[in-house]
Amino acid sequence: MKTVQEIADLVGGTIHGDARVEIHTVGSLNRANSGALAYAEGKYLGDVPTSRASCVLVPSGDFPGRTVIAVDQPRLAFARVAQWLLPTEQPFDGIHPASIVHENAVLGDDVAVGPWTVIETDVQIGSRTTIYPGSYIGRGCRIGTDCVVYPRVVLYPGVGLGDRVVLHAGTVLGADGFGFVFDGERQIKIPQVGHVKVGSDVELGANTCIDRGALDETVVGEGAKIDNLCQIAHNVQVGSHTVISSQTGVAGSSRIGSHALIGGQVGIADYCLIDDHAIVAAQCGVPSRKRVRAGEVYWGTPARPLRQIKRQQAHLGRLPKLAEEVKRLHAEIEELRSKIED
Amino acid sequence: MKTVQEIADLVGGTIHGDARVEIHTVGSLNRANSGALAYAEGKYLGDVPTSRASCVLVPSGDFPGRTVIAVDQPRLAFARVAQWLLPTEQPFDGIHPASIVHENAVLGDDVAVGPWTVIETDVQIGSRTTIYPGSYIGRGCRIGTDCVVYPRVVLYPGVGLGDRVVLHAGTVLGADGFGFVFDGERQIKIPQVGHVKVGSDVELGANTCIDRGALDETVVGEGAKIDNLCQIAHNVQVGSHTVISSQTGVAGSSRIGSHALIGGQVGIADYCLIDDHAIVAAQCGVPSRKRVRAGEVYWGTPARPLRQIKRQQAHLGRLPKLAEEVKRLHAEIEELRSKIED
Amino acid sequence: MKTVQEIADLVGGTIHGDARVEIHTVGSLNRANSGALAYAEGKYLGDVPTSRASCVLVPSGDFPGRTVIAVDQPRLAFARVAQWLLPTEQPFDGIHPASIVHENAVLGDDVAVGPWTVIETDVQIGSRTTIYPGSYIGRGCRIGTDCVVYPRVVLYPGVGLGDRVVLHAGTVLGADGFGFVFDGERQIKIPQVGHVKVGSDVELGANTCIDRGALDETVVGEGAKIDNLCQIAHNVQVGSHTVISSQTGVAGSSRIGSHALIGGQVGIADYCLIDDHAIVAAQCGVPSRKRVRAGEVYWGTPARPLRQIKRQQAHLGRLPKLAEEVKRLHAEIEELRSKIED
C-alpha cells in the first residue's frame, strides 16, 4: 500500500486533494473502487467527478472534492505506478519434486520450477526466473534472470533468452524453420540447425512461434513486444523496442528495425527490410524483398504509403461520375456533329 | 441404440418405411453403413436411393424401398439426434493420482481430472466436469458443471467459465492483454489485471487465445462458438450465440453483439461496435472504432457493405472500356475540329 | 565426419580442390567455420572466395585456392548432404517411468516416450518413433515408424499418422471440426466424429491445427509440408507433396491437389478445389466453391490470376490521367461549340 504522496513523488506529479489517502490497487476510471488509483485523459476527464477511485492521474486541472495527481502523461504514469504498486504473482517457490531437471543444469538463486516440467542437459537459468508447470526447456538453452515462463512453453534446444523476458503460455521457440527444396518429386528439408536469440525485456504472447534460424540465428531484439499467435520465421531479425500485434507473420530472413510498429494480421514476406520507426497498418501485406520506410503509415496488400492509397481511393470513388461525364461528352459531340452537318 | 420410431418422435418427423429399424450411429450419406442415420438436403437428395444408411432424414418425399424420416430441417434434426444418440467420450474417471490439486480447491461430484494437471488454490470446479491431461488451472478460477477441458489448456488466474463449456486443446484463457505505453525509449507495460468471463455453452477451438481484461473483463457470451487459432484481446465483449470462424482476431475493447456471424481470418480493430446479427465476411478488416450494422454482409478491407463493393467492382470492370471510349471521343473531336476549320 | 570425396560421391558432383578435406557440419556461406560445408548460388557466388567454409557446393566454376564441389543444384545437394551428415537429435531412449502408457498400447522396437506423456488405450506406435515430453496420444491413434512428435502435441482419438511424420510442438490433430446449425435461438453442434489421416513424410509446424472430419476424414497426403499456426478444417484434403506456408487456413471440405504451393496467411473458404500444381500467393482469399487452376499464380481477395489483377492495376494507375483527359475533352468541346455558334 502506498499514499497519494508517495505516488506523486514517483511520477513527479502535483497533488490536488488529500496527499494522505491510501492506495492499494489500480482500476479503470468507471469501475475502480475505494483504495484504487485510476487515470483519465481526453474525453474521459468528464468522468473524473463520478469515479469512485480514491485518486485519479490527470493531465491537469482541479476537480473539487476529488484527489487527483496532475502529471504530463497520465497513462504512462499509471503504467509506472502499477508496476511498482502491484505485487508480482508468484504461485510457487523452489524446484517442484514433480519436475525433471537434468543434473548438470545450472540454476541461479531463487529459481522456481513448477511440476510436470522438463529441463534438459546443459541448460542455464538465471536468478529469480520462474518456469511454470508443463514447460519444456531443451538442451543447451540459456535463460536470463527474472524471466517468467508461463505454462506449457516449449524451448527447443539452444534457445537464448535475456533478462526479464516474459513468455506467455503455449509459445514455441526454436522449432524448425520452414525450408524445403523440391527435387522434382518431393520436398527435401533444408537443415534447420541455427538458433533463436531473444533480448532482455522481451514479451511474447500466447501460442506465438519463433522458429530457429536455418543455419544462423533468428533474433528478437531487446524490449520488443510480440502479441499472441504471431509467427516469426527462420533468420528473421526483429529490432529492439519494436511492437508486433497479434496474428502477424514475418517470413524468412526479413529484418524489422527498432521502434517499428507492426499492426495485427500483417504479413511480411521474405527478405523484406522494415526501417527503424516504420509503421505498418493491420492486415497489410508486404511483398517479398520490399523496403518499408519510416515517416508514413504503410497500408494494404501490396503495402504502400497510406497517402497513395487514399489518393487512389478518391479517384475510384469518382469513377461513377467520370463514366457519366464521358457519356455526356459523347452526347454533346453528337449534338455538335449534327449542327455542323446541318 | 434407438429405433427409427424413437428418432422420428424426437425430431417430430414422419416415417416413410420401416419404423422398427435400429440405429446405433450417424454417418454421411455416401459413406454411412448399415445401422447409421444420415441426412440429405438439396442436390444430395438424389443420392438417397444409393446410400447404405439404414435411415435418412429428408425434407420430404418418398423413396421406394428406403426408410426415411421427413422433417423440416434435416441437418438440424440430424445434429439433435447425434447429440442424443452418440455416447459421450469419457476416457477416465476421478482424480488421477498424477495430478496436483490444491487442497482448498472445491470439486463437484464426478469431476474427472487427468494426469499431469495442476489445479491451483481457490479453484472451484462444477459437477461432471472433465479436465484432460496436461491442463493448468490457475488460482481462483471458477469452472461450471459439465465442462470439457481438453488436453494442455491453460487458464491463468481468475478465469470464470459457465456450464457445459468446451475448451479444445491448447487454448489459453487469461494471458495478459497486449497494452504498452511508450516512454520515449521503451515500451512500458500497462497493468493487465482484469479477468476473463466465459458464458455457458461456449465452445472454443484449439490453440485459441482469450486475453484477460486490462482492468476490467473480457467477456464471451453464452452459447458463443469460436473456432481454432482465434485471438480475442483484452476487454473485448463477444455477444451470446455469436459464431467466429478460425484465425479471426478481435482487438482491444471491441464489442460484438449477439447472434453475429464472423468469418475466418477477419480482423476487427480496437473499439469497434459490431451489431447484433451482423455478418462479417472472411478476411474482412474492420477499422478502428467502426460500427458494423446488421442487414448486409460486410466485406473487404476496410470493411464495407458488400453491395457497395460490388458496385465499385462493376465500375472497375468497365474501366478498360471507358478508357477506349475516351480515346474515341478524342478522335471524334479532332474530326469535328477539322470539319469546322475547313 | 565425411571427406569432400564422400560428399561429392553422394551428390554426383565434381571436386575442384582437395578431396581429402574433412567435413563435420554445415553452415551458411558467410558464417561457416572450418570443417563446414556451405553452398552458393547466383549473386552469392561472389562470396565464395572469402567464405571460411572448408568446402562449398557451387553450380560450376573454379575458385582458386578453395575446395568446391560443382553440382547441378547446389541448394538441393546441400539439403541432401545435411540429412546424411548431421546426427539426428535423440535426447532420450526408452519409455520414461514418468509417462502413462496404457497397458494395451502396442509399441514397436526402440520407441522412445518422454515424461509427462499420456498414451491412451488401443494406440499403436511404430518402431523408432519418438514422443517428446508432455504429448497426449488419444485412444486408438496409429503412429507409423520413425516419427518425431515434439513436446506438447495433442492427438485426439483415432488420428492416423504414416511413417517419418514430424509434428512440431503444440500441434493439435483431431479436435472437433467447427460445425453448427442454428435452431432459431442457439447454435446446435453437428457431430464431429470423423478422423484425421496424415500420410508418410508429412511435417506439420508448431501450434498448427488439423480438425477431425465431421463424419468422414480430414486427409493430409504423403510428403505434404504445413508450416506453423495453420488451420486445416474438417473434411479438407491436402494433396501429396503440397506446401502450405504459415498462418494459412483451409475451411471445411476444400480439396487441395498434389504439388500445390500455398503462401502464408492464405484463406481458402469451404468447398474449394485447388488443382494439382496450383500456386496461391500469400494473403490470397479464395471464395467458397472456387476452383483454382494450375499454370498461373492466384493473388488477392477474391483470388484471381495475377495477370488479370496486374492489368486492372495498370488501368487503375492510369485513372488520374484519364480523369484529366475527360476534363480536357470537355474544354475542347466547349471550344468547338463556341466556334460553331459564332
Image (spheres, coloured by chain):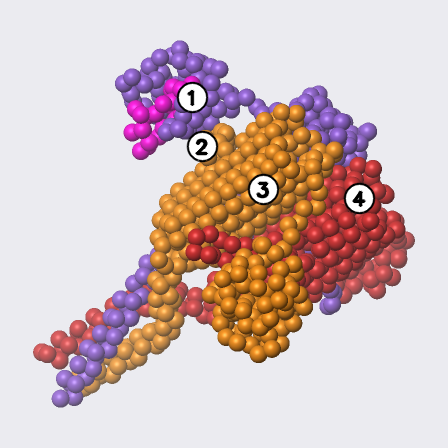
Chain colours: A purple, B orange, C red
Marks 2 & 4 on one chain = no
Q: Place residue B142 in its image quadrant.
A: top right
Marks 1 & 4 on one chain = no
- Cα–Cα span, label 1 and label 2: 13 Å
Q: Chain of mark 1?
A: A
Where residue C299 appears, as percent x and y from the top left, is: 52, 64
Which marked residue is nearer to the observer: mark 1 or mark 3?
Answer: 3
C35 or A322: nearer the viewer: A322
- Cα–Cα span, label 3 and label 2: 27 Å
Residue C115 in view here: yes
In the picture, which quadrant includes the C terminus of chain C? bottom left
Q: Is residue A319 magenta?
A: no
Q: Chain of mark 3?
A: B
Which marked residue is nearer to the observer: mark 3 or mark 2?
Answer: 3
Considering the numbered disc 4 on the image, is that residue within a helix, a strand or a loop?
A: strand
Q: Amino acid at mark 4?
A: Val
**Residue at numbered disc 2:** B216
C321 or B180: nearer the viewer: B180
Where residue B299 appears, as percent x and y from the top left, is: 42, 58
Q: Amino acid at mark 1?
A: Ala
Residue A36's tag is: 1
Considering the numbered disc 2 on the image, is that residue within a helix, a strand or a loop?
A: loop
* Residues packed near mark 2 inside 10 Å, few (<14), some (14 to 19) or many (20 plus): many
- Cα–Cα span, label 2 and label 4: 43 Å
Is B123 placed above or below C50 here?
above
